Image: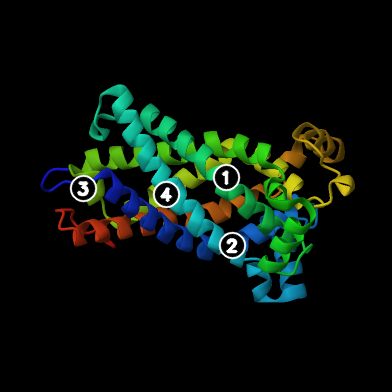
Amino acid sequence: QTDGQISTREMNVVDFASGAAGGVAMALSGHWADTIKVRMQTGEGGTMLSTARDIMKQDGLLGFYRGVQSPLLGMIAMNAVVFMSYGGSKVAMSRVTGRDEEQFNVADYFVAGCGAGAAVAFVEGPTDLLKCQIQNGRYSGLAAATRGVLSVNGVRGLFQGFSAVQLRNTPANGMWFGVYELLRMRWATQRGCRRDQLPGHYVLAAGAIGGVAYWGLVYPVDLIKTAMQSDAVVRTERVHTTFATTVRNIYARSGVRGFFRGFTPCLVRSIPANGSCFYAFELTKTAMLQRRKHRVPPLSPH
Protein backbone atom coordinates (compact mmCIF):
# COMPACT_ATOMS: atom_id res chain seq x y z
CA GLN A 1 0.00 0.00 0.00
CA THR A 2 1.41 3.36 -1.04
CA ASP A 3 0.51 6.82 0.15
CA GLY A 4 -2.90 7.86 -1.16
CA GLN A 5 -3.94 4.31 -1.98
CA ILE A 6 -6.26 1.99 -0.11
CA SER A 7 -5.31 -1.58 0.72
CA THR A 8 -7.26 -4.56 -0.57
CA ARG A 9 -8.38 -5.36 2.97
CA GLU A 10 -9.66 -1.83 3.53
CA MET A 11 -11.43 -1.87 0.18
CA ASN A 12 -13.15 -5.11 1.15
CA VAL A 13 -14.47 -3.39 4.27
CA VAL A 14 -15.70 -0.42 2.23
CA ASP A 15 -17.44 -2.67 -0.31
CA PHE A 16 -18.95 -4.83 2.45
CA ALA A 17 -20.36 -1.86 4.40
CA SER A 18 -21.54 -0.02 1.27
CA GLY A 19 -23.21 -3.18 0.01
CA ALA A 20 -25.01 -3.55 3.34
CA ALA A 21 -26.37 -0.01 2.94
CA GLY A 22 -27.54 -0.94 -0.55
CA GLY A 23 -29.29 -3.99 0.89
CA VAL A 24 -31.32 -1.87 3.31
CA ALA A 25 -32.41 0.44 0.48
CA MET A 26 -33.31 -2.50 -1.76
CA ALA A 27 -35.37 -4.31 0.85
CA LEU A 28 -37.39 -1.30 1.98
CA SER A 29 -38.09 0.03 -1.51
CA GLY A 30 -39.06 -3.24 -3.16
CA HIS A 31 -40.54 -5.73 -0.67
CA TRP A 32 -44.15 -4.71 -1.30
CA ALA A 33 -43.89 -5.74 -4.96
CA ASP A 34 -41.93 -8.87 -4.07
CA THR A 35 -44.82 -10.02 -1.86
CA ILE A 36 -47.20 -9.65 -4.81
CA LYS A 37 -44.75 -11.48 -7.07
CA VAL A 38 -44.39 -14.47 -4.73
CA ARG A 39 -48.19 -14.76 -4.34
CA MET A 40 -48.57 -14.79 -8.13
CA GLN A 41 -45.67 -17.19 -8.70
CA THR A 42 -47.14 -19.73 -6.29
CA GLY A 43 -50.56 -19.56 -7.92
CA GLU A 44 -52.32 -17.64 -5.14
CA GLY A 45 -52.97 -14.51 -7.18
CA GLY A 46 -54.41 -13.48 -10.52
CA THR A 47 -53.22 -10.19 -12.00
CA MET A 48 -50.91 -7.82 -10.18
CA LEU A 49 -53.80 -5.52 -9.25
CA SER A 50 -56.13 -8.30 -8.10
CA THR A 51 -53.36 -9.85 -6.00
CA ALA A 52 -52.63 -6.45 -4.43
CA ARG A 53 -56.33 -6.03 -3.62
CA ASP A 54 -56.44 -9.48 -2.01
CA ILE A 55 -53.42 -8.70 0.17
CA MET A 56 -54.92 -5.36 1.17
CA LYS A 57 -58.24 -6.98 2.03
CA GLN A 58 -56.67 -9.76 4.09
CA ASP A 59 -53.86 -7.95 5.92
CA GLY A 60 -54.03 -4.23 5.12
CA LEU A 61 -50.95 -2.23 4.16
CA LEU A 62 -48.74 -4.23 6.50
CA GLY A 63 -49.54 -7.32 4.45
CA PHE A 64 -47.29 -6.02 1.68
CA TYR A 65 -44.37 -6.14 4.11
CA ARG A 66 -45.17 -9.55 5.50
CA GLY A 67 -41.94 -11.44 6.01
CA VAL A 68 -39.80 -8.31 5.53
CA GLN A 69 -37.51 -9.28 8.44
CA SER A 70 -35.92 -12.11 6.48
CA PRO A 71 -35.18 -10.16 3.27
CA LEU A 72 -34.13 -7.05 5.23
CA LEU A 73 -31.55 -8.98 7.21
CA GLY A 74 -30.83 -11.18 4.23
CA MET A 75 -30.35 -8.32 1.79
CA ILE A 76 -27.99 -6.60 4.18
CA ALA A 77 -25.93 -9.80 4.24
CA MET A 78 -26.45 -10.61 0.55
CA ASN A 79 -25.52 -7.20 -0.79
CA ALA A 80 -22.60 -6.90 1.58
CA VAL A 81 -21.28 -10.23 0.30
CA VAL A 82 -22.08 -9.66 -3.37
CA PHE A 83 -20.44 -6.23 -3.55
CA MET A 84 -17.40 -7.42 -1.60
CA SER A 85 -17.20 -10.51 -3.83
CA TYR A 86 -17.56 -8.30 -6.89
CA GLY A 87 -14.67 -6.16 -5.71
CA GLY A 88 -12.61 -9.29 -5.12
CA SER A 89 -13.55 -10.66 -8.54
CA LYS A 90 -12.39 -7.42 -10.18
CA VAL A 91 -9.04 -7.69 -8.40
CA ALA A 92 -8.73 -11.29 -9.63
CA MET A 93 -9.63 -10.19 -13.17
CA SER A 94 -6.91 -7.55 -13.04
CA ARG A 95 -4.35 -10.15 -12.05
CA VAL A 96 -5.46 -12.60 -14.76
CA THR A 97 -5.72 -10.06 -17.59
CA GLY A 98 -2.90 -7.75 -16.52
CA ARG A 99 -5.21 -4.76 -16.89
CA ASP A 100 -6.31 -2.19 -14.33
CA GLU A 101 -10.04 -1.74 -13.80
CA GLU A 102 -9.94 1.48 -15.82
CA GLN A 103 -9.09 -0.71 -18.82
CA PHE A 104 -11.88 -3.26 -18.24
CA ASN A 105 -14.49 -3.90 -20.92
CA VAL A 106 -18.08 -5.04 -20.39
CA ALA A 107 -17.11 -8.71 -20.69
CA ASP A 108 -14.67 -8.31 -17.79
CA TYR A 109 -17.40 -6.84 -15.60
CA PHE A 110 -19.82 -9.59 -16.65
CA VAL A 111 -17.38 -12.33 -15.61
CA ALA A 112 -16.63 -10.56 -12.31
CA GLY A 113 -20.38 -10.28 -11.68
CA CYS A 114 -20.86 -13.98 -12.39
CA GLY A 115 -18.24 -14.80 -9.78
CA ALA A 116 -19.95 -12.56 -7.24
CA GLY A 117 -23.32 -14.15 -8.02
CA ALA A 118 -22.02 -17.67 -7.47
CA ALA A 119 -20.56 -16.64 -4.11
CA VAL A 120 -23.61 -14.80 -2.78
CA ALA A 121 -25.90 -17.74 -3.61
CA PHE A 122 -24.76 -19.37 -0.37
CA VAL A 123 -26.30 -16.43 1.53
CA GLU A 124 -29.20 -15.71 -0.80
CA GLY A 125 -30.45 -19.30 -0.97
CA PRO A 126 -31.32 -19.64 2.74
CA THR A 127 -32.64 -16.08 2.86
CA ASP A 128 -34.97 -16.63 -0.09
CA LEU A 129 -36.14 -19.93 1.36
CA LEU A 130 -37.22 -18.34 4.66
CA LYS A 131 -38.82 -15.41 2.83
CA CYS A 132 -40.84 -17.69 0.56
CA GLN A 133 -41.98 -19.87 3.45
CA ILE A 134 -43.20 -16.79 5.37
CA GLN A 135 -44.79 -15.03 2.38
CA ASN A 136 -46.60 -18.22 1.45
CA GLY A 137 -48.10 -18.45 4.94
CA ARG A 138 -46.32 -21.60 6.11
CA TYR A 139 -44.72 -19.74 9.02
CA SER A 140 -45.68 -16.60 10.92
CA GLY A 141 -42.25 -14.99 11.06
CA LEU A 142 -38.50 -15.30 10.64
CA ALA A 143 -37.82 -17.04 13.95
CA ALA A 144 -40.62 -19.57 13.42
CA ALA A 145 -39.51 -20.29 9.85
CA THR A 146 -35.89 -20.76 10.88
CA ARG A 147 -36.82 -23.12 13.72
CA GLY A 148 -39.23 -25.04 11.51
CA VAL A 149 -36.75 -25.62 8.69
CA LEU A 150 -33.86 -26.53 11.00
CA SER A 151 -35.97 -28.88 13.12
CA VAL A 152 -37.00 -30.90 10.07
CA ASN A 153 -33.85 -31.00 7.91
CA GLY A 154 -31.08 -29.31 9.85
CA VAL A 155 -28.77 -26.78 8.19
CA ARG A 156 -29.08 -28.67 4.91
CA GLY A 157 -32.76 -27.74 4.85
CA LEU A 158 -31.87 -24.08 4.38
CA PHE A 159 -30.59 -24.98 0.91
CA GLN A 160 -33.88 -26.31 -0.46
CA GLY A 161 -34.01 -25.30 -4.15
CA PHE A 162 -30.33 -24.35 -4.18
CA SER A 163 -29.72 -25.66 -7.71
CA ALA A 164 -32.19 -23.09 -9.02
CA VAL A 165 -30.59 -20.35 -6.91
CA GLN A 166 -27.18 -20.99 -8.50
CA LEU A 167 -28.63 -21.23 -12.02
CA ARG A 168 -30.31 -17.86 -11.48
CA ASN A 169 -27.61 -16.01 -9.59
CA THR A 170 -24.50 -16.67 -11.65
CA PRO A 171 -25.56 -15.25 -15.05
CA ALA A 172 -28.01 -12.74 -13.59
CA ASN A 173 -25.40 -11.00 -11.46
CA GLY A 174 -23.07 -10.92 -14.44
CA MET A 175 -25.79 -9.09 -16.35
CA TRP A 176 -26.62 -6.86 -13.34
CA PHE A 177 -23.11 -5.55 -12.89
CA GLY A 178 -22.27 -5.63 -16.61
CA VAL A 179 -25.19 -3.41 -17.65
CA TYR A 180 -24.65 -1.09 -14.68
CA GLU A 181 -20.97 -0.57 -15.53
CA LEU A 182 -21.66 -0.26 -19.27
CA LEU A 183 -24.15 2.55 -18.73
CA ARG A 184 -21.89 4.36 -16.28
CA MET A 185 -18.95 4.12 -18.70
CA ARG A 186 -21.02 5.53 -21.56
CA TRP A 187 -22.56 8.35 -19.55
CA ALA A 188 -19.23 9.31 -17.99
CA THR A 189 -17.66 9.45 -21.45
CA GLN A 190 -20.51 11.64 -22.72
CA ARG A 191 -20.14 14.02 -19.77
CA GLY A 192 -16.34 13.98 -19.81
CA CYS A 193 -15.99 12.86 -16.20
CA ARG A 194 -15.07 9.83 -14.13
CA ARG A 195 -17.75 7.27 -13.31
CA ASP A 196 -17.61 8.13 -9.62
CA GLN A 197 -18.34 11.77 -10.53
CA LEU A 198 -21.68 11.05 -12.20
CA PRO A 199 -24.68 12.81 -10.62
CA GLY A 200 -26.96 10.66 -8.46
CA HIS A 201 -29.78 10.34 -10.98
CA TYR A 202 -27.41 8.64 -13.43
CA VAL A 203 -26.55 6.08 -10.76
CA LEU A 204 -30.24 5.52 -10.01
CA ALA A 205 -30.99 5.03 -13.72
CA ALA A 206 -28.05 2.68 -14.31
CA GLY A 207 -29.02 0.58 -11.29
CA ALA A 208 -32.67 0.45 -12.32
CA ILE A 209 -31.84 -0.65 -15.88
CA GLY A 210 -29.34 -3.18 -14.52
CA GLY A 211 -32.12 -4.60 -12.35
CA VAL A 212 -34.45 -4.95 -15.33
CA ALA A 213 -31.66 -6.72 -17.24
CA TYR A 214 -31.10 -9.08 -14.28
CA TRP A 215 -34.71 -10.24 -14.20
CA GLY A 216 -35.26 -10.18 -17.95
CA LEU A 217 -32.49 -12.76 -18.34
CA VAL A 218 -33.46 -15.30 -15.68
CA TYR A 219 -37.08 -14.79 -14.65
CA PRO A 220 -38.30 -18.33 -15.52
CA VAL A 221 -35.48 -19.78 -13.40
CA ASP A 222 -36.52 -17.52 -10.53
CA LEU A 223 -40.08 -18.79 -10.80
CA ILE A 224 -38.82 -22.38 -10.64
CA LYS A 225 -36.74 -21.42 -7.59
CA THR A 226 -39.75 -19.88 -5.87
CA ALA A 227 -41.86 -22.97 -6.51
CA MET A 228 -39.17 -25.22 -5.03
CA GLN A 229 -38.58 -22.98 -2.01
CA SER A 230 -42.30 -22.45 -1.33
CA ASP A 231 -42.90 -26.20 -1.31
CA ALA A 232 -43.24 -28.27 1.85
CA VAL A 233 -40.21 -28.49 4.11
CA VAL A 234 -40.88 -32.19 4.78
CA ARG A 235 -39.37 -33.97 1.79
CA THR A 236 -42.03 -36.67 1.49
CA GLU A 237 -44.71 -33.97 1.18
CA ARG A 238 -43.04 -32.03 -1.62
CA VAL A 239 -44.54 -31.69 -5.08
CA HIS A 240 -41.47 -30.04 -6.64
CA THR A 241 -38.78 -32.55 -5.70
CA THR A 242 -36.13 -31.59 -8.28
CA PHE A 243 -35.45 -28.78 -10.76
CA ALA A 244 -36.55 -30.94 -13.70
CA THR A 245 -39.71 -32.08 -11.92
CA THR A 246 -40.60 -28.48 -11.14
CA VAL A 247 -40.21 -27.51 -14.80
CA ARG A 248 -42.53 -30.35 -15.85
CA ASN A 249 -45.08 -29.46 -13.16
CA ILE A 250 -45.25 -25.79 -14.15
CA TYR A 251 -45.48 -26.59 -17.86
CA ALA A 252 -48.18 -29.22 -17.32
CA ARG A 253 -50.27 -26.79 -15.28
CA SER A 254 -49.84 -23.54 -17.22
CA GLY A 255 -47.75 -24.08 -20.34
CA VAL A 256 -45.01 -21.63 -21.35
CA ARG A 257 -46.96 -18.73 -19.85
CA GLY A 258 -46.63 -20.35 -16.46
CA PHE A 259 -42.92 -19.54 -16.39
CA PHE A 260 -43.68 -15.81 -16.55
CA ARG A 261 -46.36 -15.62 -13.86
CA GLY A 262 -45.62 -12.62 -11.65
CA PHE A 263 -43.25 -11.04 -14.20
CA THR A 264 -44.96 -7.63 -14.07
CA PRO A 265 -44.59 -7.00 -10.32
CA CYS A 266 -41.04 -8.32 -10.56
CA LEU A 267 -40.13 -5.68 -13.14
CA VAL A 268 -42.03 -2.98 -11.22
CA ARG A 269 -40.08 -3.89 -8.09
CA SER A 270 -36.73 -4.04 -9.86
CA ILE A 271 -36.73 -0.36 -10.86
CA PRO A 272 -36.84 1.33 -7.42
CA ALA A 273 -35.15 -1.57 -5.61
CA ASN A 274 -32.07 -1.77 -7.81
CA GLY A 275 -31.81 1.94 -8.48
CA SER A 276 -31.87 2.71 -4.76
CA CYS A 277 -29.48 -0.18 -4.02
CA PHE A 278 -26.73 1.11 -6.30
CA TYR A 279 -27.36 4.71 -5.23
CA ALA A 280 -27.00 3.82 -1.54
CA PHE A 281 -23.92 1.73 -2.34
CA GLU A 282 -22.15 4.49 -4.25
CA LEU A 283 -23.14 7.18 -1.73
CA THR A 284 -21.85 5.13 1.21
CA LYS A 285 -18.69 4.12 -0.63
CA THR A 286 -17.91 7.72 -1.51
CA ALA A 287 -18.47 8.85 2.08
CA MET A 288 -16.25 6.09 3.48
CA LEU A 289 -13.46 6.81 1.02
CA GLN A 290 -13.65 10.50 1.84
CA ARG A 291 -13.25 9.69 5.51
CA ARG A 292 -10.03 7.90 4.59
CA LYS A 293 -8.86 11.17 3.05
CA HIS A 294 -9.05 10.01 -0.53
CA ARG A 295 -9.77 12.62 -3.10
CA VAL A 296 -13.09 11.20 -4.27
CA PRO A 297 -15.69 13.89 -5.07
CA PRO A 298 -19.02 13.40 -3.27
CA LEU A 299 -21.88 11.86 -5.23
CA SER A 300 -24.22 14.64 -6.31
CA PRO A 301 -27.89 14.11 -5.38
CA HIS A 302 -29.02 15.97 -8.52
Amino acid type for the residue under numbered disc 1: Phe
Q: Is residue 299 visible?
A: no
What residue is pinned by disc 1? 122
* Mark positioned earlier in the residue sequence (3 or 1): 3
Q: Nearer the viewer, mark 1 or mark 4?
A: 1
On the image, numbered disc 3 is attached to which residue? Answer: 6
In percent of width and height, residue 76 lies at 48, 59
Q: Secondary structure at mark 1?
A: helix
Residue 102 point in image, percent of width and height: 24, 34
> Mark 4 highlights which residue?
207
Task: Classify mark 2: residues with Cα within 10 Å, few (<14), some (14-19) or many (20+).
Answer: many
Please name which of the two marks, 1 or 2, marks the residue nearer to the observer: 1
- Kind of residue sitting beneath label 3: Ile
Cα–Cα span, label 3 and label 1: 28 Å
Residue that mark 2 sits on: 31
Could you say where residue 232 lies in the image, as x and y percent from the top left? 82, 52
Q: Residue at x 54, y 63 (%)?
A: 72
* N-terminal-most mark, 1 or 2: 2
Residue farthest top in this picture: 97
276 relative to 283 in the view: left or right: right
Mark 4 to mark 2: distance in Å? 17 Å
Dividing the picture into quadrants, the one containing residue 209 is top left
Quadrant showing the C terminus: bottom left
Please state which of residues 63 and 18 is positioned toward the viewer in this rendering: 18
Badge 2 element: helix
Q: How many other residues sit within 10 Å of disc 3, few (<14), some (14-19) or many (≥20)?
A: some
